[in-house]
């Protein structure tokens, strides 16, 4: 898009934002242009809190469906818009409410810990939620000696290394992070000697075990800001590199694997943000009976951390 057109579109978005009394939230994995026009950039939970706290009637959530759903649950009195209705999370769709209901009958008394990357229906069937930043603390906070961890087997497997509890894994995975291999780590060590390799816990176990740091996106942002290292290899979705470079212009960042691109996170464009505000589309809402149950799992997580 030409610069003049982009500027006109950004102006239009600002006008519409005022008209709609809206706030724009962008996930860390969104394209740079969308991050730049957002009022807040962050991870899904952080953004849901921003949605709840915002003094606005309309929330434009630039991310994927489950994130807008979480915002709608934590801010039920606001209108939450997802600019691209098809932006979905394959991991979140690897378990459904009815499937979880059935499987948990096989494990009476075993609490279900559900990653925030899940649908509202699944959160409603769970005992407690977690994020990639607090999953270990959440599992260790439970009294029971066994937990059922849903839906990401890589995050659950990572947690199992830091708890004495038995972690029963669901078979889900993030199709983007799951592509990273040990060979990517070996290649990065050769190409960028001495640079720390930081990966997301959604990566497979052989990758997390051989990385220097395993962190959520928020954890990566904090680590990079604090470290004296000038070159870093980043093992998460490529969108985060835009934010890291912007906030740390003196540092160099290398993507661990070319496969670290989530197409769903790239569907949202400036045009779609403008369209969403103009037409108030697509509204994301959660039926009250599901919301009531799901917010209990979210609230339990917040008591832990
Ligand atoms: O919770 C999120 O926003 C995701 C998808 C990852 C992370 O580590 O922040």
Image: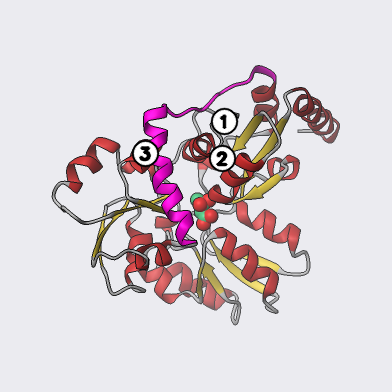
Residue 182 in view here: no
User: Of discs 2 and 3, which sits in the foreground?
Assistant: 3
Distance from the alpha carbon under mark 1 to that under mark 2: 7 Å
Classify residue 269 by image quadrant.
Answer: top right
The residue at which mark 1 appears reads as: 82
Residue pushed farthest top?
A: 279
The residue at which mark 3 appears reads as: 293
Q: Secondary structure at mark 2?
A: loop
Q: Residue 231's spot in the image, x, y percent? A: 67, 73
Label 1 packing within 10 angstroms: few (<14), some (14-19), many (20+)? many
Residue 152 in view here: yes
The residue at which mark 2 appears reads as: 63
Q: Secondary structure at mark 1?
A: loop
Residue pushed farthest right?
A: 4
Instruction: Give, as a single range, the part of the protein colored magenta.
Output: 278-305
Q: Is residue 229 above or below residue 53?
A: below
**Do the numbered discs 1 and 2 sit on residues whose CB atoms are within 8 Å?**
yes
CB of mark 2 near ligand 1 (< 8 Å) = yes
User: Of discs 3 and 1, which sits in the foreground?
Assistant: 3
**Do the numbered discs 3 and 1 sit on residues whose CB atoms are within 8 Å?**
no
């Amino acid at each position: 898009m030409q610069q003049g057109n982009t500027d006109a579109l950004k102006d239009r978005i600002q006008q519409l934002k005022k008209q709609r009394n809206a706030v724009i939230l962008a996930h860390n994995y969104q394209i740079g242009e969308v991050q730049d026009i957002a009022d807040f950039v962050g991870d899904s939970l952080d953004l849901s809190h921003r949605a709840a706290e915002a003094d606005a009637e309309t929330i434009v959530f630039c991310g994927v469906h489950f994130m807008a759903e979480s915002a709608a649950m934590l801010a039920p009195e606001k209108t939450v818009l997802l600019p691209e209705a098809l932006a979905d999370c394959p991991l979140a769709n690897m378990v459904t409410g009815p499937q979880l209901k059935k499987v948990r009958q096989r494990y009476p008394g075993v609490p279900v810990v559900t990653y925030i990357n899940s649908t509202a229906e699944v959160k409603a069937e769970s005992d407690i939620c977690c994020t990639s930043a607090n999953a270990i603390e959440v599992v260790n906070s439970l009294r029971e000696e066994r937990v059922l961890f849903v839906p990401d087997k890589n995050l659950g497997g990572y947690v199992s290394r830091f708890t004495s509890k038995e972690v029963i894994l669901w078979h889900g995975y993030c199709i983007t992070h799951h592509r990273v291999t040990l060979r990517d780590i070996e290649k990065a060590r050769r190409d960028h000697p001495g640079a720390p390799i930081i990966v997301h816990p959604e990566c497979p176990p052989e990758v997390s075990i051989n990385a220097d740091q395993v962190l959520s996106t928020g954890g990566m942002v904090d680590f990079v800001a604090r470290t004296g290292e000038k070159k870093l290899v980043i093992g998460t979705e490529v969108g985060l590199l835009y934010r890291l470079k912007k906030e740390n212009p003196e540092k160099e960042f290398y993507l661990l694997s070319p496969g670290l691109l989530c197409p769903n996170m790239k569907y949202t464009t400036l045009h779609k943000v403008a369209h969403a505000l103009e037409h108030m589309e697509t509204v994301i809402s959660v039926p009250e009976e599901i919301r009531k149950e799901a917010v209990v799992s979210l609230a339990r997580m917040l008591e832990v951390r």
